[in-house]
Each structure stands twice: as C-alpha cells, then as structure tokens.
Image (cartoon, rainbow, N blue to C red):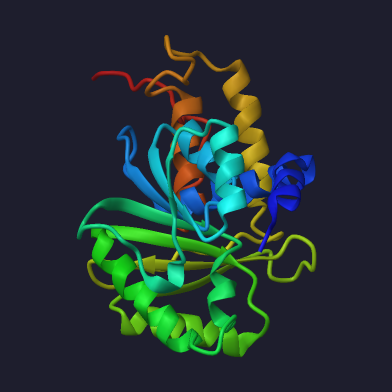
Amino acid sequence: FYDETESQKYSSNSHIIAIQAEMTERAMELLALPEDNSALILDVGCGSGLSGEVVTDAGHMWIGMDISLPMLNVAVEREVSGDLILKDMGHGVPFKAGTFDGAISISALQWLCHANASDQNPRKRLLRFFQSLYASLARGARAVFQFYPENSDQSELITQQAVKAGFSGGLVIDFPNSSKAKKVFLVLMTGGPQLLPKGLSEESGSHHVANAGRRTFAMASRDKKGKPSKGSRAWIESKKERARKQGKDVKESSKYTGRKRRRL
C-alpha cells in the first residue's frame, strides 16, 4: 500500500494522471449511462480521486472507497467533490440495495486475488465483494473494472466469482495486439443477459474517430452550454461515436447526415 509520501508522488505524476483519466473515460463509456441524466457512481479503489474527477467532469456524482488512508488524505487535500470511505473492498460494499446507477474501478480489482494475511481467502473475498456490489446497484446498472490480470487463471477466477454473485458480462479487451496500449476491462451487468461491448482495436480506428470528433466539435454550431446544437451533424456524430465506444453497431454517416429534410 502507498504511504503518505508515495501517495503524494503518485497523485502529482502527470503521466499517471493522464493514463488514469484515459482509462476512466473508457470505463464511463462502457457503463453506457443514459444521456442527459446525472448518475450516482461508486468508485472502488478510488485512491486520491483522480478517476473521480473524470466522473465529476462528466456531470455525475460519486462516492469513493479505498483501503489506503494516505491516498484518501490526498483526495481530501485535493478537495475532490466525491464522498470518501475507508474500506477494504474484500469486506464488501457497505451500501443499501439499489444505491448506485453504476460502478467503476481503475487498477484495483487484481489486488483481491492476493492474500495479505493468513485469514484472507481470495476466492471468498471476491465473492463477498461481488455479491455486495450486485446488491448495491440499481436494476439494469453496470459495473466496469479496468485491471491488470497476472494470467488467464486470475481472469477466470474473477469472472467466475462475479457470475456466481449474479452478474452477467465478461472481459472487453482494447487493443489486444499492442503490448503498450492493451487494456483489460471486466464489464458486469445486472438485469439479465445483454450484448457485451466490443473492444477497441487498431483496425477499427476507434481512437482516430474520437480525435476527428473533437475537431468537428470545434467548428460546429453550439448551444448556450457550448455543446453541438441538437440535430446538427456534429451532434449526430457525437451520438454515433458514443454508441461505437459502447460496443454498438452504428450505421456510417453519409453526405446527407445532419441535413434538414425537405417537406413534400
């Protein structure tokens, strides 16, 4: 675990901040939250609140839990907007049924696979965590975990315990053929089986599409809040890009996209 010095270093490292933000943005996409609604998100292993800031910027509220007091102290010093709880996730999620509209976790889940004391059983701790998380989520909500599995056996153990707790879903792997860009996400769903989102790949060009979308927004007409005007080409493209990143099949745009139709 991080002590106070290491917690400060971690939370002020510009490279770490950028990576955390990128992975959190992807996790939020995979949550597939309803648009234009503010949701309450649980951030498991929230650390110093780097991931929580992304949730805040997306217009949502959040509660973070972490086992490291030094990390939470840094979060308090940084004046993050979320509420914070000192809690070992292996002991379960301490919230009422149906509290959260979604849950995310960045770079934390793999630690449940390790026994740090003689009385810790990873299999039991994983099941306790997933059972309590399942109960704390609203019907139809998702939980998305970015994590670093040591091997396929570890991934299988985690997935098995999640399914045993009632979740459906599985692994979504972005850029599986890249040693540097590869990221593993566990996407868990409540409320019955659903289609698992597709992972991003070099072939899909998803990361290039995202950049193109940002360029389009800069030139597009905007409303008073600075967003592309509803019905404009930029607005339509942003909706399509969001759907693509959630793993949905989306029809390609044509030269007529965003044009007003003539009335006959």
254 to 84, vertically: above or below: above
Measured from the top left, where is residue 176 in percent x and y? 69, 70
x%, y% of residue 89?
A: 44, 67
Q: In which quarter of the image is the C terminus?
A: top left
Q: Is residue 233 toward the left or the right of residue 163 in the image?
A: right
Asked whether, in this view, residue 173 is left or right of residue 196, the answer is right
Taking depth in this image into account, of 35 and 151 the one nearest to the observer is 151
Asked if residue 179 shows in the view, the reply is: yes
| Residue 44 coordinates in the image, percent (x, y) | 47, 58
Q: Nearer the viewer, residue 202 or 135?
A: 135
Q: Residue at x 67, y 52 (%)?
A: 205
145, 115: nearer the viewer: 115
Q: Where is residue 81 in the image (x, y as percent from the top left)?
A: 46, 33
> Residue placed at 33% from the left, 66% from the top?
133
Indicate the quadrant containing the N terminus: top left, top right, bottom left or bottom right: bottom right
Residue 249 visible: no
Residue at x 57% of width, y 64% of height: 108
Looking at the picture, tell me which residue is in the foreground, 70 or 239: 70
How many numbered badges does the structure rendering display?
0
In the depicted structure, whether residue 226 falls above or below residue 172: above
Q: In this view, does 200 lie above or below 177?
A: above
Left or right: residue 4 versus residue 256 is right
The quarter of the displayed image where residue 110 is located: bottom right
Name the residue furthest top.
Answer: 224
